[in-house]
Image: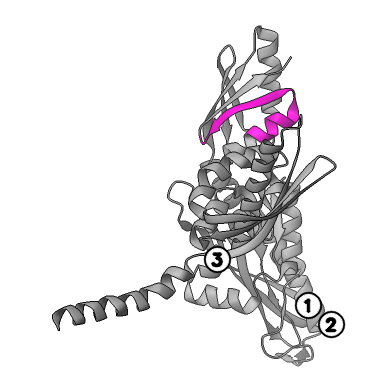
Amino acid sequence: MKQYVCLLALMLLFCFAAPNGFSQTKCINTSGEAAIVNQDVPSAKLEAVARAKWAAIEQVVGTEVKAGSFVQNFTLVDDVIKTKAGGVVKSYKVVGENIKDDIMNIKINACVEPSQAREAVSQLGLNNAIAVFIPARKPGHRGDVFEETNILSETLIGKLIEQSYTVVDVAPTHAVDAREIEKAMRSGSTLSLRSMMYKFLSNLIIIGKVDYTISTKKGEDIGYGLSMPFNNVTVRLNYRIIAKNNKTGNMEILSTGVEQAKGLANNVEDATAEAMKELAANLTPTILDKVGQYIKGNTKKVAVRVNGIEDIDKVLEVKQILQSIVWVSEVQEKQMGDFVVSYPENTLYLANSIKQKGNFKIVNFSPYSLTLDLLK
């Protein structure tokens, strides 16, 4: 009887545990391709499988921005896949392959663990990639009617782009809606915001909600026998700047605040638009300052070793190349071929940028070091 009870308990435990175990992985069909170089089909197949695996990871996470758009040289991403995909892609099988015009195409069925997939994708997030979503309540409408693209968000995005930031306007993608943001602002929940980071490979999000009130209506008695000649509208913005802490991996609130501005016009819509323009002009410098501080605070020192440098002229030439890379703030030469580069992003992007600048071959890279060969 005792053995029967133990067996029954084990069966019940298995029944309750099984659904969770099965729900941990998601199996999907994806494909990848690679060029066949020097008739080396096995190497092309390995690369195509690696790309198919990464495609499966991106599909499970639901990214709106693909890693390939950030890193044109996919061989660098392969190194990330080798270190991450092993634990993310639990299993896979090749379901089809073909070769056409020296291009190997592989189709696989891959089983991916979602939480680890999100972590792998987040490794490719850019500190200077900013996701912006600031919906505004539409004037003259009752209820929750929002303009997800408006004067304030468009102005802010334009100013950020002028400063060479990579900016993603979340609104056209429909990845999140105004009600979700309003709920997140009230509750302090970061679940939807974390999802936005995964989707847009961004480490920094600017979110908010704009509301308005009619302070004084046109024609309203303002005392002394006078009537208000215009509609006086006040717009208020509640916003947060949230970023990923690269040391802890946690989300942190960089800044939170409430800003307001007033506008005068014959109708409510125009008065609201004027107030939004003033609000944008007042808010933009504050946002740029906070973002700049975040970028500066996340800048790290990367040791760059360039093999093949034999004279001082070549040292100066390579140093100039390194200094010309976007977001490189400082380059120090330590000795012949050794440099220390101040850079705020993933070393992967620095490696790719250097390779695009000249005749360099990437030998090895890690989060804080990079080795290259200077090709003659």
Q: Is residue 317 above or below residue 214?
A: above
Residue in the image at 58% along x and 64% along y: 27
Q: Tell me: 343 left or right of 19.
A: right
Residue in the image at 82% along x and 77% along y: 270
- Image quadrant where residue 212 sits: bottom right
Q: Are marks 2 and 1 in contact (CB under 8 Å)?
A: yes
Q: Separation of disc 3 and disc 1 at Cα?
A: 51 Å
Q: Are marks 3 and 1 in contact (CB under 8 Å)?
A: no
Tell me the element at label 3. strand
How packed mark 3 is, by other alpha carbons closer than 10 Å (few <14, some 14-19, many 20 or more), is: some
Q: Separation of disc 2 and disc 3 at Cα?
A: 57 Å
Q: Are marks 2 and 3 in contact (CB under 8 Å)?
A: no
Q: Separation of disc 2 and disc 1 at Cα?
A: 7 Å
| Numbered range of the magenta stretch | 351-367
Q: Tell me: 290 left or right of 144.
A: left
**If the image is split into quadrants, where does the N terminus sit?**
bottom left
Quickly name the residue at label 1: 271
Image coords of residue 271 (percent x, y)? 78, 77
Quickly name the residue at label 2: 266
Determine which of the numbered discs, if any, sits on residue 329 in the image.
none
Quickly name the residue at label 3: 26
Image coords of residue 252 (percent x, y)? 47, 57
